Image (cartoon, coloured by chain):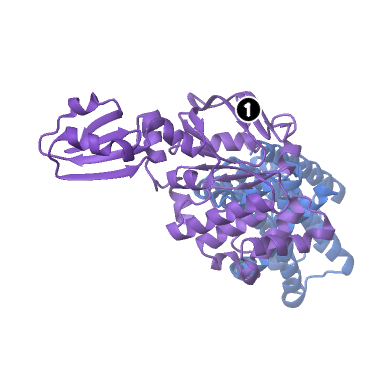
Amino acid sequence: MSEIEGIYAVWLREAKIYIREKERLVSAVISPLLWIFGFGAGIGTTIESVGGYSYQMFIYPGIMVMTVLFTSLFYGIYVIWDRKLDFLKEVLVAPVSRASVFVGKMLGGATDAMVQVIYLIIIGLIFLDVPFTPLTIIEAFLMLLLISIAMVSIGLVIGANLTSPEGFSLVINFVMWPMFFFSGALFPVSNLSPWLAAVTRINPMTYGVDAMRGIILGINHYSLLLDTAVLMVFTAMMMGIGIMSFRRM
Amino acid sequence: MVIKTEALTKNFGKITAVNELDLEVKEGEIFGLLGPNGAGKTTLISMLCTMLRPTSGKAWVNGFDVVREPGKVRKSIGIVFQQASVDDLLTGRENLQLHNLLFEVPKAVRKQRIDEVLSIVNLEKRADDFVNTYSGGMRRRLELARGIMHHPKILFLDEPTLGLDPQTREHIWEYIKELASKECMTVMLTTHYMEEAEQLCDRVAIIDYGKIVALDSPDALKNNVARDIVKIKQKIPDIEKIRKLGYVMKAEEKEGTLYISIKDASLHLQDLLSNTGPIDFVEVRRGSLSDVFLHYTGREIREGDAEGGFWERMMKR
């Protein structure tokens, strides 16, 4: 019972701060809008259609994954700030296990990301006529939650092991951009050169993007079962490493 | 004994921060660890609070082994850190609510306990304001309130008044004294302010390079070294002659001024002055803990040294 309350306490703090930092809420909306309406609409004028959908529509599931990926990974930086400001100490000396502290933080980060997902779903419904059904909205939401948990865990691992915010930004860029570019978020993974195909195959995000595209647009490269299985194993691994990092903190 | 250590040691690489330290703290006392920055005070407290694992040696807090039973130790202690650790973007009350959840304060008494601790530190009126509108002293008070929320048997205070102005500092001392008596707590605090140790502590351990160099009540420590110090300025001092006087414990010349430590100025001042010959200036002052510190370590303790790195100072608003 006390561990659940500990998780709740850590999550509650994150959620309250997220709601109070208006900048975070605003930037959460703007960057995906730029990708969809700036990048997607721009490139879309030169590309006829992909798999029967406009380019803008084709990358929409990928942009959702990207948004979750960026927000979740960057969330790890708050651990560094918390430690600099010593807030984390209060939590670390509490009689609550480090696993619970980790899970609380992880859920806090996932909450950030999922608020953005809700924006994106609304934008998709209103402006892009994305063919959502109530069921696919729920499926997409759960899939993105899974991706978010994995990515927040990676962010927290990096945050727990570094002491400077600058270092964090550097390291996270090396993780974030390759994961995004080689995930097929912006292009179909079906006819790539062998080396690019190999890179996309070992990138867990490829399966996330594929699953999302499957759920929303019905275009699948792998089966949804394989996508989900890969992501679940990956998420479990990252959570494990995350809890270990928090134990050493 | 509520706190006991045996040959407690912590090494950071080649540096020994705490060196085979033996210590016993009695129930109900306010115990001070006095020493310059880097003496090992915070490291010692961190080990007692189970934040750091000792390299070797043993320590018990409230009878629980700090290495084997960290959870039980944590539940029985309260901590106020050197750097403010209350959350800026939450209100005072919200900070306390989180603490309730984290430290398993029973649901039934949570609300009442929050009001109780807020009134002890006089923050009832500001409880629902965001902490980033608080002054430094108010933050420290909020942290004190939080530290005692869960009825700890021991309260650890790491530099409780670091960076506060003298007036606020005195207020905080009052709060600490009040807390200790009202809540029947043992208090262990670190400080590098001499005055703080003299004002607050029942017993003081002087720590230097990770070792205890002296341990006693502030008064007894002062008595061992020098009750009074006579400062004399004169044209041609005869320091050798003064040193030969029976009641003079120590005589030194620094920058043209003689510093003479004697047991009791009220008894010996007249005789001392008759032996020094004509003087330009005389001043008598009571020995302080800084004289004690100087005596035991051979160094002066410098007050008000900023501790911590660039970010800590940047973020301390």
Quadrant in the picture for the N terminus of chain B? top right
- Secondary structure of the residue carrying numbered label 1: strand
In the image, B11 versus B311, the foreground residue is: B11
As rendered, which of A170 and B239 lies closer to the eye? B239
Q: Residue at x 45, y 55 (%)?
A: B314
Q: Give the mark count.
A: 1
Chain A hue?
blue
Left or right: A248, with B198 as reference point: right
Q: Which chain is purple?
A: B
Quadrant of the image occupied by residue B187: top right
Tag 1: amino acid: Thr
Q: Is residue A127 left or right of residue B226?
A: right
**Residue B134 to residue A186: above or below:** below
Q: List x then y, in percent, for residue B284.
A: 29, 44
Residue B255: horizontal and vertical position, in percent?
18, 38
Q: Quadrant of residue B67?
A: top right
Q: Observer-nearest residue: A96 or B265?
A: B265
Does residue B254 sit above or below A180 in this rendering? above
Q: Quadrant of residue B43?
A: top right
The residue where tag 1 is placed is B5
Q: Is residue A179 above or below residue A111?
A: above
The residue positioned 83% from the left and 69% from the top of the image is A132
A173 vs A4, nearest the viewer: A4
| Residue A28 screen position, x and y as percent | 64, 66
User: Residue visible at 59% across and 29% down?
Assistant: B23
